[in-house]
Image (cartoon, grey):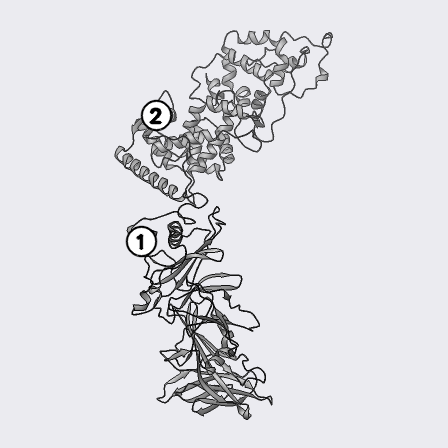
Amino acid sequence: MEQQQATSPRPDRDRNPVPSDTAETERTEADVFEPGASEADADEPGASEADADEPGASEAEADEPGASEAMTSEADTTGAETAAEAGEPDEPKADAPEAGEPEADAPEPAADEPDAPATGLPGPAAVTGLPAVPDLPALPALPDPTGLPGLPELIDIDQAEVALVEHYPHLVRLAYLLLPSGGSRGRRVLAAHALVQRALPRQRATTRGLALPAPRAGDEAAADPGYTFLRGRVLKAALAAGRPRRRLPLPPPLLPQVWGLRLFPRSGGADELALDQTLSALSGPGRAAFVLRDLEGLSAPETARALEAAGVSDPDGALDEAAGAPVPAGSRDQSLLESAEFDPCALQARPTDLIRRRQHVRAALAAGAAVVVCGALLGLPGEGWGPDGAAAPPYAQNAAAAAALDPGRLTAASPGAWKTATRQDFATWPARGDRTGDKALLRRALAVWARPGARVPVTATPGTPTGPAAGPPQLLFAGVVDHAVVVLFHDGLRVVRYAEAADGEGQEAGGGASLDFARTDGAQAASSGALVANRTQGNTRYLAAPWVTSARLVDLLRPDGAGQQVAIGADGLTSPVPTPRPEEKCTTWPALRMGGRLLTDLGELAPARLTYGGPRTPGEVASPQAATAWARGGCALAGLRGQGVRTVNAWEYARQPLPRGAGDAQWVCDRAETWRGTGSRTLVQFLAPAPGGRPYAPGTVAARAEGTTACGLRSPQALAGILWKDTGGQWWLLAAGSKKVASLTVTGGVQGRAPGRLLAVKTAAGARAKLVGRLADGQPVEALR
């Protein structure tokens, strides 16, 4: 009984010892026919000492009747096996006689020689004198250098699956005990099952390099190499799950999952509760050492090897921690670790929080409905044009939006409203064109205005909102212009132009339409004389105001030209006129004189009006002086394109005699006002005497400014300076101010002072100076730069 318990790896499971003669016979057969078992016996010092050194074992065998006779009778057939077990596996085979030869040299045993010991091991004489065995098995292989005696180098998936299914309850119990006890027991149960199920490898796995304990024949589970392999993976995964994470916690595993129930093991007694508290107090490695020692029955070296293979940095410390843990008395019949308290396969079921679950179900249904609605809205419409043309899907519906999209609620002024109106502007324009009754066209235009699609190009002047109309807009024009169908709307703040290809090109792909916005609030008769209807191939066609009866095309840079008459049709459309092209060499600038006012196209829906005169009383460009000022400074208009310009005024604020009798120079301040009120541009040009043969030579830009009040209605003052070289090669600093400037002072690289508003000081090329003027009351006037 004592010998059987000493060699068993699991003392709590081997309850029925076998008789000593049967045990001895089984051990001998295993040594002969199972090389793996021989290696285990050879490598484990505990087994050799138990067989050779324990006197209790010899006495037990000697006292049993028939043991010595059984061994003696079998000496002739098992001598080779006992010799190998006695520690002589390397005896050369050549010393044994061949089969069938006479035993001439074999000595006879002496009569007075003592009997063989009770262990059944023959003495040296018996070993050397035995006859040869015909079928002697091969010597056992050397121990595996990987440290896995008894384990194959490769574990097949099928072998691992069979081991997992066979030992699943025990592996789950092991994982349950290894996991930390924090949190609910139900989550711990599911985590244990998930760890074991994920321990199955996805492909053939190798055991080389995994310092797992060797399987022993005393325990059926431990002798299974697949079980030993899975136990190592479960141990490693459980230790990893118990370590604190610096990053976000991992989501729970997809399987297994339990819905609507809480599962937990059965409750134990006071001893189980005390053991659970002991395990909770241990660290992860310490708890693993405790479970491997008491549940798996591993020795201290085996436990240390298993912990080291699982990634534990201090296995000896974990063993010491487990050895110092207090252990309850437990039960006499079985270990506490095998009780129902720690069995995650025998579970109790209880319902979850039913009230909270109903709330969660209602919230999930509401969220799902919201997702379905959003998906339906995002999925509309399909490719091609529907009733709304190239418009995007409708995302909101209200009374104002519906009214703005209804072509039947468009407003239109009567044909003669402009004649009796208090103020002539875009609001008094009647609806013109040959497509004003096309409800489908108007519906498409309104829908694209409200919801332009992704393939609809949209342009807008700075500061112009591009949203839908607040209510039904006013229709100004709807008809075919060249190769496009054009619709013009006015909503009191903006003019909106919708255009689509007349032949329907691009409609299948959801494109073929364009949208343009221009701000026109506060327009008067002078600034509402025309709108751009269409631009094609460098030409522009305008829609003239109903009070405009004639139009003439002029070249702004050649004021002495006669110009060209432009026809205006019954629908208000003009014939095509050239569009100004900003080029490096400015040689021409087309402008349109309509009803005595001079208009030019700056790339927007509303053409800019050109004026001449003082900031407080600008007038039309009618005098030769005004025409000359614009002829010499008209090329500067190229820098104002696309800025939402409403008017541009040219003001000659000073004339200055040049040194050494070089003639008189003009100082002209050009100020561009915008429809939005902000973002004005100011430009000062120095017009030296024109050379012979070039009366309209362009001037020189002396200063530029943006967002200033200079040269404007609020501050009708101007001051600027420039470096000028005379015909003799002398450089001069020239400066001029408006009429109210009383004195000028220049400091820095150039020093000078002059009463009045004109200054001329000799200087060098590239000199830099600061120019300041003062009014008669002493207020300073900053110079434009």
- The mark lying in front, picked from 2 and 1, is 1
Residue at (51, 36) in percent of width and height: 308
Residue bearing mark 1: 409
Give whichever of 12, 437 is nearer the camera: 437
| Labels 2 and 1 touching (C-beta < 8 A) | no
In percent of width and height, residue 322 lies at 42, 34
Residue at (39, 51) in percent of width and height: 438
391 lies above or below 20:
below
Q: How many numbered marks does the figure carry?
A: 2
In percent of width and height, residue 484 lies at 47, 55
Residue bearing mark 2: 347
Task: State the separation of the CA atoms marked 2 and 1.
Answer: 73 Å
**Does the rendering let one see residue 306?**
yes
Could you tell which of marks 2 and 1 lies nearer the N-terminus?
2
Q: Secondary structure at mark 2?
A: strand
In percent of width and height, residue 402 lies at 31, 50
593 lies above or below 217:
below
Q: Residue furthest front?
A: 570
676 lies above or below 711:
above
677 lies above or below 468:
below
In percent of width and height, residue 616 lies at 36, 80
Q: Secondary structure at mark 1?
A: helix
**Does the rendering let one see residue 710?**
no
Q: Amino acid at mark 2?
A: Leu
Q: Residue furthest left?
A: 355
